Image: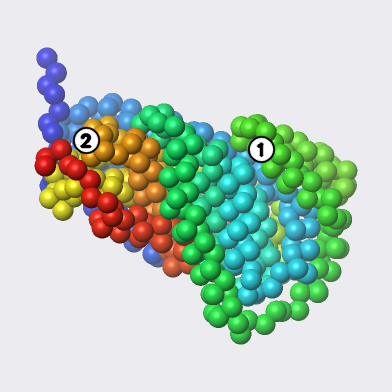
């Protein structure tokens, strides 16, 4: 008769997690790939699981379940890779850069990037769509203006995160409502109540940084870039039409995957009609991205995209999700939940506890979804007894898990930023104003705001 696995102890939990997290941090700091630290973490969790009495097939099943959970995100990322490649080849992003070099200036560029990316994510309900479309165009434009890459990507990431957070089309809000109950409009209003002031503060900070920190940045002579773009592409405002079409598809509630698919077909037709590309060239652009001699600045700006070039991001997401589910299967996450929930410091501060749990689980599991789903059953009754609605629980978990995902270098969100924009959290975190302020305000409000009535009182 098979025996039940033992309950994991704190010492085993530390052995299962700390070495893997340290390996991830060390690899991130020195610029090594993160695949091996994730594989190390999976085997380490598996070893501890076997010691506790789990069968290796249980560990394998957990890892495969984790990979399955991120399959939707993987499909979106591959479509975004194809979109970036064809938008480059069709002259859509080059046209954006061409006209942007005439309209934008360094002091205001960061705020404009923050707001434009926010709008794209708000309308599409996806930070991934914002990063992979307008984000890439803004990065190329900012690079041409001579601005530092980390601050550009920080502003773009902040805008995408802010738009996704408060969007009525956000998959995370829908997921939280389906798990915890409540009404989606109520949850959106709660997210806006805190998110909108933080958005305005962040916009002002980017404006101040641009006007003060970049006041000595002289606008470089970019005439050679415009000439280069004209020599490579047919440039026209009409080439913004695929961007408008994508906006309209999302506004009419077309799901993001078919919307991106339709946009790929439309953009491919434009690439063949306007730029004179053959069908083979279109397929190559979607597969391998647009390529140009990277010895020039223009080549560094335009050489992006392609499904094949997102293979590294897909690998990292699959391995991170596999590691997260193996830790959950052997009981590490449940141990953390029970340990924190019994701390006296959180007595009557259920909102701060939920924010912390969302933050920790998101950082440990590399993903936002487990940070929303796993703590919810443990916290639901406490929220009810404290007099809070279920939408408040969803808000606290979303804010904590979403904000930290933009700031740690091993999260799935960071892998997406790394794949689309070229650099990740270690370089951009100091300039990621929105998640830093949001997380700070959430904790301060949780600890020092309205005191809840705990069931232990």
Q: Is residue 298 above or below residue 367?
A: below
Q: Quadrant of the C terminus?
A: top left
Label 2, label 1: how far apart the Cα atoms are: 39 Å
Q: Is residue 102 above or below residue 410?
A: below
Residue underneath mark 2? 385
| Count of numbered marks | 2
- Which circle marks residue 322 in the picture? none
Q: Position of residue 183 (x, y in %)?
A: 44, 32
Residue occupying image coordinates x 62% and y 39% = 79
Left or right relative to 9: residue 220: right
Q: Is residue 57 above or below residue 264?
A: above
- Whichever of labels 2 and 1 marks the residue nearer the N terminus, that label is 1
Q: Residue furthest top?
A: 1
Q: Position of residue 293 (x, y in %)?
A: 72, 63
Q: Nearer the viewer, residue 211 or 196?
A: 196
Residue underneath mark 1? 251
Q: Position of residue 184 (x, y in %)?
A: 47, 34
Q: Position of residue 247 (x, y in %)?
A: 69, 42
Disc 1 is placed on an element classified as helix
Left or right relative to 220: residue 171: left
Residue 64 visible to the viewer:
no
Residue 76 visible to the viewer:
yes
Q: Indicate which label's residue lies in the foreground, 2 or 1.
A: 2
Tell me the quarter of the picture where residue 107 sits.
bottom right
Tell me the quarter of the picture where residue 61 sits.
top left
Q: Nearer the viewer, residue 106 or 21?
A: 106
Disc 2 is placed on an element classified as helix
Residue occupying image coordinates x 84% and y 69% = 227
Left or right relative to 129: residue 186: left
Colour pattern = rainbow
Residue occupying image coordinates x 62% and y 62% = 113
Q: Residue furthest bottom?
A: 216
């Amino acid at each position: 008769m098979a025996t039940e696995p033992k309950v994991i102890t704190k010492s085993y939990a530390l052995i299962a997690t700390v070495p893997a997290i340290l390996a991830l941090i060390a690899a991130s700091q020195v610029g090594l790939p993160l695949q091996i630290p994730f594989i190390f973490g999976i085997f380490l969790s598996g070893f501890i699981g076997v010691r506790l009495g789990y069968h290796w097939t249980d560990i394998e099943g957990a890892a495969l379940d984790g990979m399955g959970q991120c399959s939707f995100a993987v499909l979106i990322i591959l479509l975004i890779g194809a979109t970036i490649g064809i938008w480059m080849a069709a002259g859509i992003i080059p046209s954006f850069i061409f006209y942007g070099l005439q309209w934008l200036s360094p002091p205001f560029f960061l705020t404009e990037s923050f707001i434009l990316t926010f709008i794209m994510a708000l309308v599409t309900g996806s930070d991934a769509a914002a990063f992979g479309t307008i984000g890439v165009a803004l990065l190329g434009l900012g690079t041409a203006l001579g601005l530092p890459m980390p601050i550009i990507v920080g502003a773009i990431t902040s805008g995408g995160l802010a738009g996704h957070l408060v969007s009525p089309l956000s998959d995370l809000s829908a997921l939280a409502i389906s798990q915890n109950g409540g009404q989606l409009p109520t949850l959106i209003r709660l997210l806006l109540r805190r998110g909108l002031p933080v958005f305005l503060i962040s916009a002002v900070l980017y404006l101040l940084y641009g006007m003060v920190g970049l006041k000595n940045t002289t606008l470089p002579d970019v005439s050679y870039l415009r000439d280069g773009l004209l020599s490579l592409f047919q440039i026209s405002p009409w080439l913004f039409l695929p961007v408008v079409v994508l906006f309209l598809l999302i506004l009419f509630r077309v799901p993001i995957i078919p919307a991106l698919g339709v946009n790929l077909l439309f953009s491919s037709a434009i690439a063949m009609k306007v730029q004179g590309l053959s069908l083979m060239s279109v397929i190559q652009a979607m597969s391998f991205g647009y390529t140009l001699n990277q010895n020039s600045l223009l080549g560094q700006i335009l050489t992006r995209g392609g499904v094949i070039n997102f293979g590294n991001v897909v690998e990292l997401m699959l391995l991170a999700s596999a590691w997260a589910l193996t830790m959950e299967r052997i009981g590490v996450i449940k141990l953390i939940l029970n340990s924190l929930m019994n701390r006296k410091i959180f007595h009557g501060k259920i909102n701060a506890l939920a924010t912390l749990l969302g933050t920790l689980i998101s950082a440990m599991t590399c993903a936002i979804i487990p940070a929303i789903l796993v703590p919810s059953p443990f916290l639901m009754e406490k929220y009810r007894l404290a007099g809070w609605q279920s939408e408040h629980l969803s808000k606290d978990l979303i804010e904590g898990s979403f904000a930290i995902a933009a700031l740690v270098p091993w999260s799935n969100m960071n892998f997406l930023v790394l794949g689309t924009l070229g650099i990740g959290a270690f370089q951009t975190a100091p300039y990621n104003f929105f998640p830093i302020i949001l997380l700070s305000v959430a904790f301060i409000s949780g600890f020092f705001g309205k005191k809840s009535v705990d069931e232990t009182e």
